[in-house]
Amino acid sequence: MSTVSGGVAASREVLVLLRPSGVAGLVPELADPSAPHLTVKDQGVSRGDGLFETALAVPGDHGALTVRKLGAHLGRLGGSAEILDLPVPSPAQWRQAIDMGLAEFARSCPGTAATVKLTVTRGPETAAGLAPQPTAWVLLTATALPDPSVRPAGLRVLLLNRGLDSRVADKAPWLLAGAKTLSYAVNMAALRHAKANGADDVLFVSSDGQLLEGPTSTALLVRRNAEGRRELVTPLRQQGILAGTSQAVVFAAAEREGWPLGYGPLTPADLEGIEGLWLASSVRGVAPVLSVDGEPLPVDDELTDRLNAWLREDRDPGAHAVTV
Ligand code: PLP
């Protein structure tokens, strides 16, 4: 996609391919984002066999762009790669490609925020006996930076059965629960189902009744603990959900401020009496949930602002670091 202003074409997208090179391993190379680059035999296309990460790059001083929580995203990608047994570029190779993309994007779209999507697939199908060569690229796309003075829109959420039980990660690792795979058709179908039924988003529930995550977000809730203090809680990660990088930095900041933290397990009954529920993700930020299955929930603007400020602090998640 490109826009034309004043007769000058300004690219709103920047693509960097990680090209295999016999001598140097993988070499980053700028490419035209609107031109075709994949073969129809790529297993990312034919089987959804691959991984991705989406991070947010924000403009800072001197026009440079900085990717928020990049270490956490690269760490999670490495963990997902282990689950898929997929050879992926090293963190240093990703960083080299991202730096090239950021420099080009800052030049062509000064002062603009971007989503930074890293994708790696198992590569083109090969003849028996030949090792596949992964396909990898980084795509930067202009996005409106969430304005700190404007709260993310409130969400009407439906609870939808994911059809897998909460011990799926241990019992059936081949289902790849907890990895950020390219197979997001189910997640997108769940969002379409919500929209067709008058809602905005989804919170998945396991077949044995545990609250899990949204199709593109992590659930956070605030409730009073046994001592009457507010605590910040998220569903148990070992239930086959994605380890959220946003949840990790928000928890790290909350802990620095002395908040008690909790990690599930949670069921829909635990939504009774809470002070608020939010869906958190890197690009949208921390969005308050207005209702679940039509039942209104309390909405606390001050807490929404605080959670988003913690997300923007973007300090090392430390003990809450993302591992899958
Ligand atoms: N859970 C799922 C299934 C997701 O797809 C995402 C993000 O896309 C998240 C949680 C939130 O992750 P993060 O906070 O790292 O963006």
Image (cartoon, helix red, strand yellow):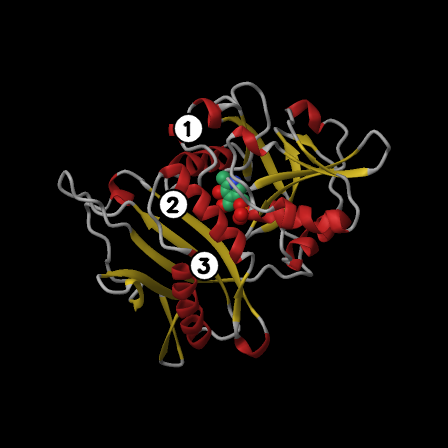
Circle nearer the viewer, 3 or 1: 1
Circle nearer the viewer, 3 or 2: 2
Left or right, residue 133 beside residue 226: left
Q: Tell me the element at label 1.
A: helix
- The label on residue 51 is 2
Question: What is the quadrant of the N terminus in the image?
Answer: bottom left
Under mark 2, the amino acid is Leu
Q: Tell me the element at label 3.
A: strand
In contact (CB < 8 Å): disc 1 and disc 2: no
For label 1, count other residues whose C-alpha is less than 10 Å away and answer few (under 14), some (14-19) or many (20+). some
For label 3, count other residues whose C-alpha is less than 10 Å away and answer few (under 14), some (14-19) or many (20+). many
Provide residue 158's location: percent of width, then percent of height.
57, 31
- Distance between the alpha carbons at the discs numbered 1 and 2: 16 Å
Can the viewer see residue 252 in this picture? yes
Q: Earlier in the sequence, mark 3 or mark 1?
A: 3
Asked if the beta carbon under badge 1 is closer than 8 A to the nearest atom of ligand 1, the reply is: no
Q: Which residue is mark 1?
A: 173
In the displayed structure, 310 sits above or below 228; it is below
Q: Earlier in the sequence, mark 3 or mark 2?
A: 2
Residue at the farthest left position: 127
Q: Tell me the element at label 2.
A: strand
Under mark 3, the amino acid is Val
Under mark 1, the amino acid is Pro
For label 2, count other residues whose C-alpha is less than 10 Å away and answer few (under 14), some (14-19) or many (20+). many
Can the viewer see residue 163 in this picture? no
Q: Which residue is mark 3?
A: 116
